[in-house]
Image (tube, helix red, strand yellow):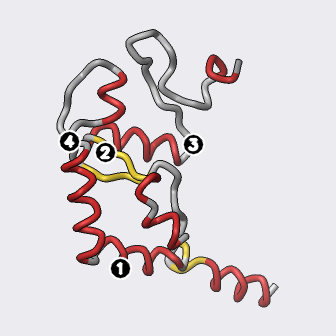
Amino acid sequence: MIMLAKTRRTYMQNNKPLWFGQTKRWYDSNRWRRVASAHKNQYPLCEICLKLGIERPVAVTDHIIPHNGDYALFWDWDNLQSLCATCHGLKRAVEHGGHMPGCDVDGNPLDDSHWWNKT
C-alpha cells in the first residue's frame, strides 16, 4: 500500500500531472507568444465558428490534439488552430468527457466522435 501511494505521487502532484508545470513554462515563454501571435495573424477567425457560418475573431491559439506534455506535439504548427473563447471552452468541456454541441451549415455534427460521423 505504501508503495502505491509513493508511485501515485510520482505521477500526480496536487491533482495535476507532473508535466503540467513544465508546459506552463512553455506557455509562458516568448517563443510560445511569438508562435501563437503568428498563428492568430495567419488565421484571424475562429475555425469552429467558420464551420457554422459565423465570423468571430480569434482569442486563443489551441492545440488540436492535446499535447499532454509532448514537446514535439506542443510546438507542431500543424497541431494548432484558432478559436474564440466560447469554442475553446466548449472544446475543453469535450476533452473532459462532454460532447461538442451543434452542427455545421450542412447539418453535420461538429463533434467528430458523434455517431453520424462514424458512418
**Residue displayed at 31% across by 53% down:** 61
Q: Position of residue 31 (x, y in %)?
A: 28, 74
Residue nearest the viewer, comparing 78 with 67: 78
Q: CA distance from mark 2 to mark 1?
A: 21 Å
Tag 3 residue: 97
Height in image: 43 above or below 80? Answer: above
Q: Is tag 2's residue or tag 1's residue first in the polypeptide sequence?
A: 1
Q: Secondary structure at mark 4?
A: loop
Between 22 and 10, the one lying in front of the other is 22
Q: Type of residue at label 1?
A: Arg
Picture layout, residue 33 above or below residue 65: below
Marks 1 & 4, CB-CB < 8 Å contact:
no
* Of pointers 1 and 4, the one earlier in the residue sequence: 1
Q: Which residue is mark 4?
A: 44
The percent coordinates of residue 116 (x first, y second) are: 63, 17
Task: First in sequence, mark 4 or 3: give its number.
Answer: 4
Q: CA distance from mark 4 to mark 2?
A: 7 Å
Which callout, 1 or 3, points at the residue further toward the start of the chain? Answer: 1
Q: Which sits earlier in the primary sequence, circle 4 or circle 2?
A: 4
From the image, state whether disc 1 or disc 4 is nearer to you. 4
Quadrant of the frame with the N terminus: bottom right
User: Which residue occupies 52% across, 32% down?
Assistant: 99
**Residue located beneath label 2 in the image:** 82
Please indicate whether residue 109 sits to the left or right of residue 117 in the image: left
Q: Secondary structure at mark 3?
A: loop
Identity of the residue drawn at 50% across and 15% down: 108
Q: Nearer the viewer, mark 1 or mark 3?
A: 1
